[in-house]
Image: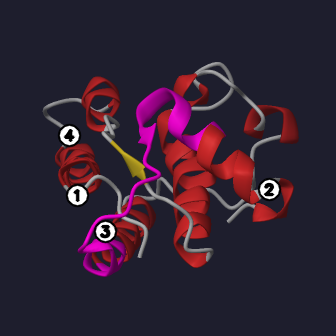
Amino acid sequence: MAPSSAYSPRSLAVVFTAPACKDNRQSASNGGAVRDRLTSLLQDLERELRMQARWETESPSAEALRSTEPFAVDAMDFDQWLQWILLPRMHELLRRQLPLPANCAIQPMAEEVYSADDPGGLRIVAIIGEIDALLTDNQGGLN
């Protein structure tokens, strides 16, 4: 994964959440369970990307990683965004016990990217849908 040292904790919450999710700064009573389930879903997403040979060994350029466009559409494809932006930043939020995003809407983009007749793509869409629902339904949570 891309080194997370290029991002400060403050920029993680702001940059990641801007296009697809709304940052949540309020605690939820079941935050620990949300974080555990989110960790599991992120592992599932990575495993699925790897099994489908969508996982890349080389990071996009530093310029591509700094993209401010939603899902970095100007600089990388969606699989790359999942691998190099979403996964590292979500793991960093979890590791540092920072507020998680709420009201996520990543699934609509995934549905646009992956064809309805692509079983592998549909598995990725389903995992992303679970992530969206978990964070939105539980409003992120802090614990």
Dot in front, 3 or 1: 1
Q: Which one is earlier in the sequence, the residue at label 2 or at label 3?
A: 2
Q: Which one is earlier in the sequence, the residue at label 4 or at label 1?
A: 4
C-alpha separation, residue under disc 3 versus residue under disc 4: 20 Å
User: What is the crowding at mark 1: few (fewer than 14 residues within 10 Å), some, or many (at least 20)?
Assistant: some
Name the one closer to the observer, 108 or 80: 108
**Mark 2 belongs to which amino acid?**
Ser
Residue 76 falls left or right of residue 24: right
Dot in front, 4 or 1: 1
Dot in front, 3 or 4: 3
Q: Which residue is mark 1?
A: 138
Q: Which residue is mark 2?
A: 8
x, y percentage for residue 123? 20, 53
The quarter in which the C terminus is drawn is: bottom left
**Mark 4 belongs to which amino acid?**
Asp
Say the numbered circle drawn on residue 80.
Answer: none
- The residue shown at (83%, 64%) is 5
Q: Examine the structure image and report whether residue 125 is included in the region drawn in magenta.
A: no
Q: Which residue is mark 3?
A: 41
